[in-house]
Amino acid sequence: MPLIDSFQRTIDYLRISVTDRCNFRCVYCMPEEGAPIAPKDEILTYEEIERLARIAVGLGITKVRLTGGEPLVRRDIERLVASIGSLDGLRDLSLTTNGFLLPRYAVAFARCGLHRVNISLDTLQPDRFRRIARRGSLTEVMAGIGAALSSGLTPVKINCVVMRGWNEDEVVDFARLTLTQQLDVRFIELMPINWSQGDDSVSSLPHGISEQFMTLPSLGGGGLRADVTLYAHTERVSFTESFHLPSQDTQTGQLNGAQMRRAFVPTAEMRANIENELGSLLPAEIITNGPARTFRLPGAKGTIGFISQITNDMCVTCNRLRLTSDGQLRPCLMADGEVDLRHALRSGGTDTEIADLFRLAVLHKPREHRLEDGIAPIGRNMSQLGG
Ligand code: SAM
């Protein structure tokens, strides 16, 4: 019996965050000094993750993506890849990485059952790379892309978060890459994950940033709050459903809400810039198509996709659950409700009881995000949720 939510969506995709640690400090994702990380004993072991993945696959999950934090900073990650890769019934195992350590792992990954990778890359310019990612180097990431292609971890998708004043003028350069390389470049609208409200002092804010505010209809003016009411405590199962309440901390060193809104670039603008320079985009189909709307430039080897979570939200086709590295099952990226699987795992929960918790999360999967009502997730960063 597949997992079907209250809105008749079949849920067949699980994203598993294997760590909340990251070796980068992308300005929109983490403060310079890093986000708080969970104590080691709260992070699921590989055996626990594998058990949950097995239960999920038994419930009809056919696609698993490993993510983080940065999944490659977790020791022996290929061991987890191999054990999940061997699950009967799993059709697609992929991994999202910043690419920095990929040259070390690509061959081993391909051997132990990983099908493909998504690599995050926001700029093709070394100096900007240092300003945006604040760690690592463009050279290593490019080597990671090369290693993924040569190891057959394909199709290789490049995820580029587009931000005004930071990299929006590179959209055409990224699109041009697809003319000669078999890469699926996906432009992502900046999402309101854990936007802080105060502190305007990010020192690396570039000069000349456009003063034009892109005010999201939903977020203009009001404070952000977490939607905790969606997940009222339920006695339906014997395990406690838990919430991560929003932190009151004002983050520093990470773009705050006003800066993020200024940096927001809608898909339509990205697309118009590409088409003005390089010609019309033709609709394209790629295997393993996720939420992106996908196109191709005439004669191009690769494709161009847009992930328009804000201007053209994709909730109606959302098929995913997220497992955080500390064992919380999250039915919606954009709402802070979670179901505590770690407690179930560590208090003798049977596979059947844990399967019920998966069903519970699916039952509570909201129909759509509620950004229009000013509700955005603020409990945790993307690195903590599993982007
Ligand atoms: N470390 C891995 C990586 O860099 O791909 C996996 C985790 S990272 C959190 C996953 C993706 O989330 C990256 O592509 C990153 O750019 C994206 N991301 C993080 N915060 C975001 C935000 N506020 N809006 C849009 N994308 C975001």
Image (spheres, grey):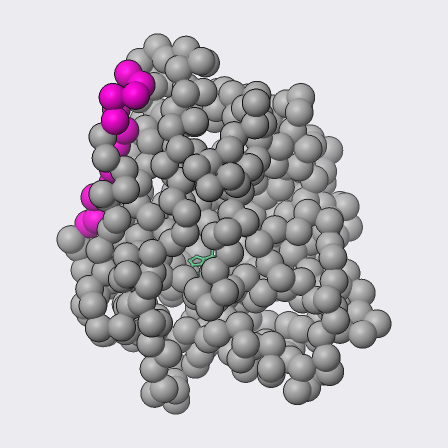
As drawn, 100 above or below 207: above
Compare residues 47 and 240 and report the one nearer the observer: 240
Where does the magenta region start and end? 234-247
Tell me the residue at 48%/60% (across/down). Answer: 313
Residue 289 shown left or right of residue 198 in the figure: right
Compare residues 380 and 79 and report the one nearer the observer: 380
156 drawn magenta: no
Tell me the residue at 70%/40% (across/down). Answer: 115
Tell me the residue at 80%/65% (across/down). Answer: 301
The quadrant in which residue 126 appears is bottom right
Q: Position of residue 291 (x, y in %)?
A: 57, 54
How would you classify the magenta stretch by its main secondary structure?
loop
Q: Position of residue 273 (x, y in %)?
A: 60, 83
Residue 385 shown left or right of residue 101 in the figure: left
Q: Position of residue 198 (x, y in %)?
A: 18, 68
The quadrant in which residue 276 appears is bottom right
Asked whether residue 76 is in view, the answer is: no
On-image quarter of the N terminus: top right
As drawn, 114 above or below 235: below
